[in-house]
Amino acid sequence: MTHLTLTHFLAVGALLFALGLVTVATRRNAVAVLMGVELILNGANVNLVAFNRYSDPSGGVSGQVFALFVIVLAAAEAAVGLAIVLAIFQSFRSIDVRTADTMRE
Amino acid sequence: MTRNSPRLGLALLLAVLVAGFLAYFGSEVLPAWIPSGDRAPPRLADYLFYAVAALTVAGAAGVALSRNILWSAIGLLMALLGTGAIYVFLSADFLAVTQLLVYIGGVLVLILFAVMLTNRIGDVDVSNRSFGLLGGLALFAAVAPLLLFVAALTPWRSHPAGSLSPTTAAIGDEFLSRWLLPFEVASVVLLATLIGAVVMARKELKPEEPRETP
């Protein structure tokens, strides 16, 4: 009888999601906001892989494939998001998310 | 560093509290709720899992609470490493290596580059102010217990997991048969991201450059 159950992994994913949500909501630094988004995506990935392992009796890997797609999109999101942050820094000389409130200079 | 030490101590204290809460939740509360057959003594893998989960959650708490953005990046490193180790517990070896390569080798380095490019190191301690610790704590108290109770109290129809086995070959088969179209679309997305990121990051880099032709 195994000791680790699905709930253990879901708890870790839930805590990652909650802390990422707090990071996104409370930070002014745009780079820190992107870090929170990465935490949220990691929490979701933990859930996907855990459900794949514990609720598929035939041993399929669809959840892992989905998590790989999430990782790909997270990398793309990080690249584009950080490029936007650099562009905002060039325009506003700050990456405080409260200063970047206009669409043009 | 001396100005940051009380704040850092508070962050570490909160991280320890969260980790202790997780350990208590996993060891005391869950066995009462989950009808888990026999109560065999815990194995080494269980202790390893608790250590890794505590590392992950402590890193995430560091991201959420640290005032210095560089400490936030270190916390993100811990959280991503711990998540990769959790993938190993879930028999997802290829995913763990991908996490190591893409997240830690790519995304984290990119984030560190952005931190270095956009922050003057002198005022790094005021570069990461938060909207308010109280609001963040309220949000955490609203979200985390809800998700944890859902995870703990729902009668998941879970099957006993088999032994750990490599999944790389199965993932390759799935990618090239069932998920072929999303796989190809993902490559197009990556190409578009590459071009888009270069265009966006380069456009404003030299705003004072005299343009020769309209």
Image (tube, grey):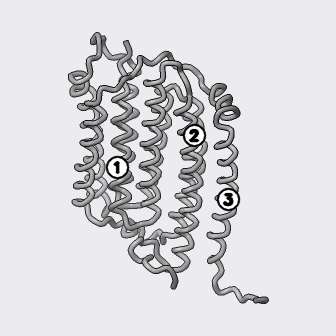
**Mark found first going from the N terminus, 2 or 1:** 1
Residue B47 at x, y percent in the picture: 36, 24
* Residue type of the residue flagged with mark 2: Leu
Q: Is residue B49 shown left or right of residue B9?
A: right
* Residue type of the residue flagged with mark 1: Leu
Label 3 lies in what chain? Answer: B
Residue indicated by mark 3: B192
**B143 vs B65, nearest the viewer:** B143
Q: Is residue B20 visible?
A: no
Which quadrant of the view contains residue B170?
Answer: top right
How many numbered marks are there? 3
Q: Residue at x 31, y 34 (%)?
A: B151
**A23 vs B187, nearest the viewer:** B187
* Residue type of the residue flagged with mark 3: Ala
Residue indicated by mark 1: A19
Residue A20, placed above or below residue A99: above
Residue B164 at x, y percent in the picture: 52, 19
Q: Quadrant where the N terminus of chain A lies?
A: top left
Q: Is residue B197 shown left or right of residue B119?
A: right
Residue indicated by mark 2: A68
Label 1 lies in what chain? Answer: A
Residue A7, placed above or below residue A18: above
Residue B94, placed above or below residue B10: above
